[in-house]
Amino acid sequence: MILRDPVSEKFRKWLVIRRAAQISVVGMFLLFPLTGVAWIQGNIGAANLFGLSVADPLSVLESIVASRRVYVPALIAAGIVIVFYLAVGGRAYCGYVCPAGLFFEASSAVRNAVLKAFSRPKRTGWNVELSPHLKYYLLIGVLAVSAVTGVMTFEIFSPIGIATRAIVNDFAPANPNAQNLERVAVAGASVGLLVLVGIALFEAAFSKQAWCRFVCPLGAFYSIVGRLSLLRVRIDHTDCALCLNCQSDCPAKYVLDRPLAKEQEFVTMGDCTNCGSCIDSCPSASLKFALRLPWQK
């Protein structure tokens, strides 16, 4: 077993890659509103990327159950996204793409800095653990309410959906409809910001990244997709020192329970975001990304 030089732990490769991806996504969707460059248009829910239409699968599913109609182009656009995340990991969306994830990770870092400044250890009361199954119940509830009311329910209170749509409409000098939408966009941006800040304050006081881990219906949807994903974290049990650094750094620690117990070789739970934190923190380099075939554990 070869342990890495502790100095090299200061460079966390996958964290850098994730941050670059998250910031690039935000910049990508601001490109057209700010410059008028038409290569990328739309928002996080539906966009045209270099001529290819893609759409948030949950939004399309909500639209279908709400309207009781199937719009084939939207279904194809959502299918392209699902196929992509079937390859790279369902909740990779949460770790690498979702701007809300970036915002809440930043608020979590502020929370940790405040606790450290006041020399307060992480107490149970400051990090309430909810059931990871809660988000699945909320997903079912969102779809049920959408079916009954005919309204795309999650789109109403989704903080990232509100904020990104408002940004695209508000800061869009290249958009000919910008003036007409200005008041609506400003209101939408304000509501979206308030929702984001409200969630961040709740997480700062009670539970680290609670929205992403326990509440978000979109995260639940991608967790289901993630159960079948090809790209997974693989553990080499012969090199693993069982130091548990990986589990300590993992935002969803329970996904590593079975691999660390040597019950399986791959992290197969859908809640894994393929963030790479466990790989970055492993001193023996026993964790790596690898392709997992459907019959492999």
Image: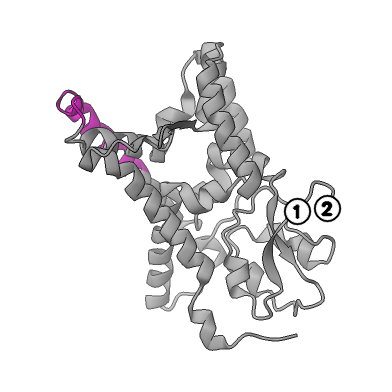
Which residue is label 2 attached to?
Answer: 296
Image: 148 above or below 199: above
Residue 169 percent across, percent down from the top left: 25, 32
Can residue 49 be seen in this snapshot? yes
Name the kind of residue labelled 2 in the image.
Gln
Residue 220 shows in this picture: no
Q: Is residue 185 magenta?
A: yes
Residue 205: in magenta span = no
For the point 19% across and 34% down, which residue is it? 174
- Residue furthest to the top in view is 68
The answer to the question of whether label 2 and label 1 lie on touching residues, with beta carbons closer than 8 A, is yes
Q: Which mark, by number, is residue 179?
A: none
Q: Residue at x 59, y 41 (%)?
A: 84
Q: On the image, which quarter does residue 227 sit in?
A: top right
- Dot 1 surroundings within 10 Å: few (below 14), some, or many (20 or more)? many
Q: Which mark is residue 292?
A: 1
| Residue 282 location (% of width, % of height) | 64, 75
Q: Where residue 185 appears, x then y in whole percent?
A: 24, 31
Image position of 81 with respect to 207: above or below: above
Q: Residues in magenta?
A: 175-195
